[in-house]
Every structure is written in C-alpha cells, then in structure tokens.
Image (cartoon, grey):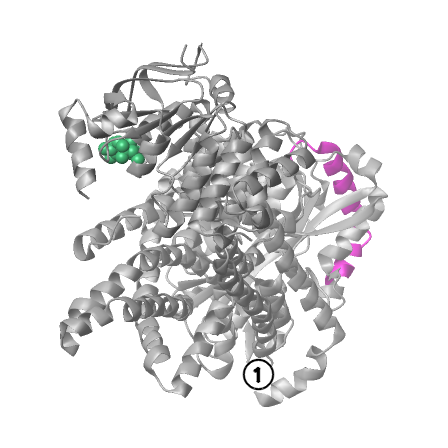
Amino acid sequence: MLLWLALIAVPLHARSLDTIRATGVLRVGVNPNFPPMSSFAADGTLKGFDVDVARRLADRLGVRLQLVPTEAASRVPFLVSGRIDLALGALTITPEREALIDFTVPLHSEAMGVITTARLPVTRWQELDRADITLVNMRGNQSVSVLREKLPKPQRLLVDGNADTIRAIAQGRADALVENVDFFVGFTKNYPDIAWRVLPDPIFVAWCGIGIAQGNDALRAATDAALRQLHGDGSIAALWRKHYGAAMTVPVSAAQLASVAKASRPTGYRFDWSGVWPELPYLAAGAVISLQIAVIAFVAGAAIGLGCALARLRGGTLLRRVCGAYVSFFTNTPALVQIFVLYYALPDIGVKLPAFAAVVIGLTLNAGAYLAEILRGGIVAVRTVELEAAEVLGLGRRDKLVHVMLPSIIRTVYRPLSSFFIVLVLGSSMGALFGVEELTGRAINISTANLRTIETFAVTGLIYIVLTLVASGLLAGAGRWLFRVRAA
Amino acid sequence: MPFLDIVDLSAGYGGAPILNGVNLSVGKGEVISLIGPSGSGKSTLLRVLIGLTAPSSGQVSIDGTPVDYASKASVRALRRRMSIVFQQFNLFQNMTALANICLAPVKTLGVAPAAAEARGRELLASVGLADKADSYPDQLSGGQQQRVAIARALAMQPEILLLDEITSALDPERVGEVLDTVRALAATGISMLLVSHEMSFVREISTRVVMMDAGRVVESGPPAQIFTAPQEARTKAFIGAIIRH
Amino acid sequence: MIDRLMAEAPAFFTRDTAAFLGLALSRTLLMTVIGCGAGFVLGMVLAVVRRSRAGWLAPARVLAAAYVELFRRIPFLVILILVLFSVQAFAPDLSLLGIAAIAVTLAATAYLSEIVRAGLESVPRAQVEGADVLGLSAAQSFWLVILPQSWRVILPPAAAFMVMFIKDTALASHLGVVELAFSGKILVNRGFSPLYGFGAVLILYFLLSWPLGRMAAWLETRLAVSRHR
Ligand SMILES: Nc1ncnc2c1ncn2[C@@H]1O[C@H](COP(=O)(O)OP(=O)(O)O)[C@@H](O)[C@H]1O
Ligand SMILES: [Mg+2]
C-alpha cells in the first residue's frame, strides 16, 4: 500500500536529450515478439524494421543504441518512468496515450484489414459481422476497441502474442484476424498447408509514431528532425520493403511530416481511480468465473486424487507405478507449462481445446496430483491409529468405514483441502494468460484500455483478498459444523 | 535482618488470584521447604520471586534492597543473586552440558570463556558428571539432566537458590542422586527455598518448613514441629494424608 | 508427426538450443534463490516482530500480521504485474529479472514468515524461561537458544516451499523474463514442434524440482531424528 501511495509524489526520471548525449546511450523499447518489426533471431539478437529504424535514429543523435525488449502493455509506463527513451513497436497514436505520453511525427501507417482462410467464404470485411464467426485479437492492441464498434457480432478470442493470432486461425480456434495486415501476414508462412487469404480494401487507417515521455521536447524535436530526413531520403520506405517484402499500404504524407509539435509539460503519475470504479461489476463477474474454475478443478481433482490415492495404497504394482508417476510429474512441473502443452501442443494431434477448457483441465490434473498426496496422507493416518481400536470393538467392515475411517480421514485432510482450494482460486488467474476472461484476465483487459495498471490491479488484488477470506471463512465454518474440525 | 524478605506478596494469572498475601523470610544459609497441596501456589511463588510472573502487590527485598519487578535492570540484578532449577530441567537442547553451564556466565557476567569452562568442569565434577561435559541433554538421563541444571544455576554464583520439585519428573531410582547433590549443596551454606514432596528429605534437610494453602502461608516452623505437632487443621490434614501413603 | 520431429531434430539438438535453455534455467534458479533467500530473511523479521511483546511495536505487529495474511491471498501473477508497474517509479533501470525477484520476495516473505513462526513456536516456552532466569537478554535468548532449536522445524517446510516456488516463477514469463517457461514458448514460436519446445522445458523443470524435493524430504527425516543438531 505504502509503495503505491508513494507513487503520487514520484519524481520524473525521463532522460533529456542532454543526458542521452552525455551518457552516449539511447534506450529504445522494442517488442521482442513482433516479427518483422522486431524479434529475437536465432543468434539471440533483436532484428527487424524497428531495430533498423532505431539504429538510424541513434546514429543521427550520435549515440550508441541500446534495445530494451518491452511488452506492448509496458511501453507507456516504461516511457513515463524513463526506463526507455523512445518506444517503438507500432505504437498507434490515440487520445488515451496522448494523455500520458507524446508522439513524434508518424513513422508508418497501420491499415486495418482481414486475414482469413479459404474456409471462410467472404469477400468484404462487412460480411464478417455474424455471430457464428470467431475473430482473434491481440490483447492490448488498438484493434480490440475498434472491432467492438465496427464488427460487434462475432465472438472474440483474445491472445497475447502476434504469433498466437495466426496459430489460433491455423488450429481452427478462430476464423479470421482483423488487424494490420502487414504485421501479421508474415506468420502465415509457419502454416504452409493452409490456404491463407487477405481481403482487399482496409477497414480504416491509423498512424503510428514513436513514443516519448511528456516534456522531453528537445528529444522529440531531434527525433522529429531525424524522422523527416529518413522519410525524405526514402530510407524508411526502403526498410519497410526490406522487412515486409512490399511497400507500405498507405504511405505517410508530406503534410503529416511537416506538422510541428507544441511544447508539452510533464504531468507525472497521478493516481486516477475513476477509470476503475465503473468496471467493478465487470471485475466481480470475473471473480465468479475464477471461483467456477477453482470449484470445477477442485471437485474433479478430488475425484482423480481419491482414485489415485486408493490405487497407490491398494492397487497392483503397475497401477501403483502409473499413479506414482502421474503424481510425480504433475507436482514437479509448473501448472503453467502443463497448460501450455494442453493449449498449444494438443491441436497438433487434432485436439482443439478452448482456452477455458485447457485451463480447467490443466488445473484439474494438477490438483489431482496434489490432492492424491493429501488424501493418501489422511488414509495412512487412519490405518495406524484408529483402525485397531475398531477391530478390537468388533465393528463390521461397513461400520468401520462409515463411522471410523471416513470421519477420521475428513478430520485429517479437511484443513489441507481447504487451503488447497484457496491455492486453486489464486491459481485460476493463470487463465488470463490464455485469454480466459476471469478476474485477472478482465483486469488485464481493463488496464490495457485505461492504462491505469496499478490502480486496476490494486483493486483486483483486494477482490482476491475478499474472495479468499470469504471462502476460507465459509470453509472453516462448514468444517466446524459438519465434521467438527477444529479452527486453525 | 533476613536475607530474602517477602511481605504481603500477591499475584495471579489474568485476574484470577493465586497468591493472596504471602509473608515469608529466608535468612542467610537457611534451607526452607515449601509444602502444601497441589495448586496451592508454591510454584507460582517461586516464579514471582525469580521474575517470571509479575506480582500484583506486595514487596520483596533481597539483602535489604527492594526488588522492582517492573524494572528490567532490577530483575537482572536480582537474577545475579538468585537462581532457580525447574521440575522439567529446561536445559537448552541445542547445547552440550558444558555449554549450558558456561552460556550465562560468559554472556551476562562477562566471564572469560576459558575461565567459565574451567569453572563449568569443576561444577560438573561436583555434581558427579565430569565425564558428561560434551553430552547433549537428550543423551542424558533425567537425573543427570537435573544435576546439570543445578550446576548451571550454580554457575551464576547465586546467594539463594530456588528449587521447584526438582525430583518429581524423575524415575524413582534416579531421585537419590539428585537429592545427594542438594544435600551436599546445603552443607556449603547457600540459602535455599525449595518445593518438594520427598517428605523424609524435607524433614532431614530443612531448617524450617512452610505450609502453604490457597495462596497463603498457613503455618511455619522447624521440621520436627510441623511433622509431629502441626498446629493448623489444614497442615494436620495434609501431613496426615502424606504419612498414610 | 514423427516425420516432423525427425526433420526438426538436427536444428533442435544443437549447442545453441542447449545454451539458450541453460541460460533460461539459470534465470529460473536465480529468481527462486534470490527471491526465496530475501523472503526468508524478511519473513524471519516479520515472524520476530509478531512474537515481540513491547508496546511500542504494537502497530508493527498488526502490519506484519496483515502483510502475512493478505499477501498469501493475492495471486502471484497479480503481484508480478503490480511490482512491474510500481517499481518503475523507484528503479526505472532495474532489470525484468530483478523485478521478478522482488515479486518472488514479496510473496515468499509472507509464506516463509508463517513457516518461521511455526518453527519458533515449536520451541517450548520453558526454554525461553530457562534463558530468562539466567539473565540472558531477549536477543541473546533468540539467537542462542530459540533459533538454533527451531531450525529443525523450519528447514524442511522452507526447503519444500522453495522447491515449490521454482514452478511458480514460470509466471514471470508474462513480464518478459526469458526463464524456462518462456524459453519453451519462444522455441515453439520459432517453429519447433511443441513436443520439443515444451517437452524440453518440462524435463528441465522435473530434473530441477524432483531431486530438490527429495532432498527436502530427506532433510525432514534426518532432522526429525535428533533434537540438538
Ligand atoms: N500459567 C498459568 N496460567 C493460569 N493459571 C495457572 C498458571 N500456572 C498455574 N496456574 C494456576 O495457579 C494455581 C497455583 O498453581 P501452582 O503455583 O503451580 O501450584 P503448586 O505449585 O502449589 O502446585 C493453580 O490453580 C494453577 O492451575
Ligand atoms: Mg508446582
């Protein structure tokens, strides 16, 4: 809390042109996963259009270039904090961003069009407005909100990386991508068996500039001048052709290059919660989905875990080995990578799981392994302690199970099971990384739109706290009431 | 003037009164035994005296100096003159017998480690455990542990020693060796205030016996008088019950 | 499928891939070790604060208890994102790995503090009294008597927690830290079969976590035997 409050009085760290010249280093943020703009080549260095532009800008400023891999959602905060001096990565000029950062003159255009396959028999983008179509989108991109407006009917699938969008279509999870065609068409080469198509006429054209911290006027003027020169001598057009294999669909006009920026003043980071409160119902509904994921994974996992625990105690050698290997594998590898496999690898053998299903199944298998261990512990504890007493009293098999074993097992495992349920509620947040719109996924959606990440996630964290406190309270109460489990 | 003087001392745990105005004094070199039914407050009295449980009212003075139990400095000064041995030994499980004995002299009295160790070995020898210096508590029998605990208390060179049922947690065949140690100690002239249920031992060693009940001193006197001709009904009942056993 | 794997094998089983995965593995380990190490120290501080009796420390006790209770109720992913954006204001030059290590520290502090607290509480009250009546100060009795005796209760679950957290650091891939999980995704994005990319990563996690987990279990049985060492 203190950490967050302290931000109100944050000094600005953006480095001026003088500082950059003095240190001799220009720090440029580029996307590490955005070929052909920028991506890691096999030799481990960043390559692409943005990288070449950045290098030329650094040359003009007479300093060395330092590339900083920056995810799309981090560009604006990194500029504001001064971690990077310039942000590339197809940063579309929008009013929301202009409230927080400044832009140079445009570097390139962004013509939004449609990439699809021969599966979908449409010829114009307007024909996509149908409820039986799924459009894939990259989270954090401008296109998300534009689509909501121009093509409201189709279902949406949100993914995190450029490569993931084309993969989603190739794997049949989505039918079409509405995005800047130039950026995405390159990925279709990964799937040569698919009959890819690009629809003609763009939906609209936007402009991308280079992002600079507010108030850094000298750096902006120098970068503007460099860009005018690079546009003027044809370097940018040439680089575009080099990396995209074609000319820019809509070139930057002379009028746009001639515009002169007004002086700006840094506004600094001020907390603004106004963008978060209206989203509370949306977040709360997301919390319900998180809870659903946790409940399903818990119940299904408990079933698997019980079977597995019994098999390990009573089963034959083979069954014991198999169950032991299952528990060992799932408890010694990350749930996240397990879900990676379910979501990204299974389609290769023809199993296409929707994101929600992949996450739930992944968490279930994971839970099954952990719950097997907890339940086994509970069963083993009975065997040694209470069973002999029941034996001495001459209880029958059924009575022994119902009156002695089960109550004892439940009392032993109830608290570990309750804690594990909380672990699952927290673990369901992993769904966000696969586009499941549970609580964390919704928080990411909101913050990429309102750029108020700290505020949004502070509220999200609080919702998780309340959610798990209530869940813990109810579970403890139920345990006391139903099974006379002592409170912690 | 008595060495330890206890006047109207009261104490309790969380409001429930346990000691209700205890008056007692211990002279230099005296050996006083506390007897009384279980729950009468004997242990609590010793805990209050050593500063583990706070008194609610009353006055304790040692050698004429009043003790202020609310002041850390005063309690620290007190603990240089008074030591205690517990029923459960409370030896530090992570240290050898010798280390248990040397710890406090080195850390609180500022004795040089070498000197402390030499003195520690002497003390161990005096309780008959010269060969156990490097043993850990869990490698020693209860009786041996209790003798180490006595040596540890003596290492602080106290002028008065409190002993709380130090044989109650021992196997019967181990009681004798610990009582021998205390007997030898009494002969050195150190003042002692002890709680014990070993009545023949109490009778033999004490200069005075004090009967406690319900947080008060009921009666006190020489052992012969308390055991053969008690004045108070409660003392009679208590002695009677014990003798019949 | 087999054909594809055979075709990709020469490109996948190279020194470059091994170096790439090795570097990623070292980042995973580094995050865990730095984060859990710092978290252990801070967690111990919180546990000690919570045990304190002094009146003027009452607010610190409440804060420490609230921290431990609350930070175990926020998903690690949310902590990661909050740290990423909050830290910008204080240390704009801190590497993503450093940011992830801070996030691990914040989470580990809360969990390890509970483990340390349980360990300290396992030492009988009588041991403290024994130190008390010998005139040892609170600090002396903590360092010389309580802590040495609580290691045996603290270490096994603390080690198990650290092993556990190796896997949770996979979430740092979301920040862009090229640790093991992310390296698998990068390999798959480069065009390798997921069987190779994720398979290699799963095996590496297993090879890291399984032996360490066994070691934690061994530690537990070993320390349970003797009380003094
Ligand atoms: N820590 C404690 N908290 C509350 N009550 C206690 C505590 N210790 C002892 N008592 C109570 O104080 C009374 C006196 O106990 P104690 O001094 O141990 O008696 P004795 O040593 O004479 O058997 C008993 O009723 C006992 O239950
Ligand atoms: Mg007692």
Q: Can residue A227 be seen in this view?
A: yes
Q: Main SS type for the magenta part?
A: helix
Q: Is residue A437 visible?
A: no
Question: What is the residue that sits farthest to the bottom in this orientation?
Answer: C3
Q: Position of residue A277 (x, y in %)?
A: 37, 38
**A226 within the magenta span:** yes
| A398 relative to B12, above or below | below
Q: What stretch is highlighted in magenta?
A: A213-240
Q: Which residue is tagged 1?
A: A193
Query: Helix, strand or loop at disc 1?
Result: loop
| C206 relative to B111, above or below | below
Asked if the beta carbon under badge 1 is closer than 8 A to the nearest atom of ligand 1, the reply is no
Tell which subunit mark 1 falls on: A
Q: Position of residue B222 (x, y in %)?
A: 29, 23
On screen, residue C171 versus residue A482, left or right, reads: right
Q: Position of residue C132 (x, y in %)?
A: 47, 31
Q: Residue at x 40, y 37 (%)?
A: B86
In the foreground, A181 or A346: A346
Q: Residue at x 47, y 63 (%)?
A: A434
| B227 relative to A207, above or below | above
Indicate the quadrant of ligand 2 in the picture: top left
- The crowd level at tag 1 (other Cα within 10 Å; few <14, some 14-19, many 20+) is few
Q: Position of residue A435 (x, y in %)?
A: 45, 61
**A267 within the magenta span:** no
Q: Which residue is drawn at 55% across and 74% down?
A: A197
In the foreground, B74 or A35: B74
The count of marks equals 1
Query: What is the three-letter code of the residue carrying label 1?
Result: Asp
Q: Residue at x 69, y 66 (%)?
A: C22
In the foreground, A92 or B97: B97
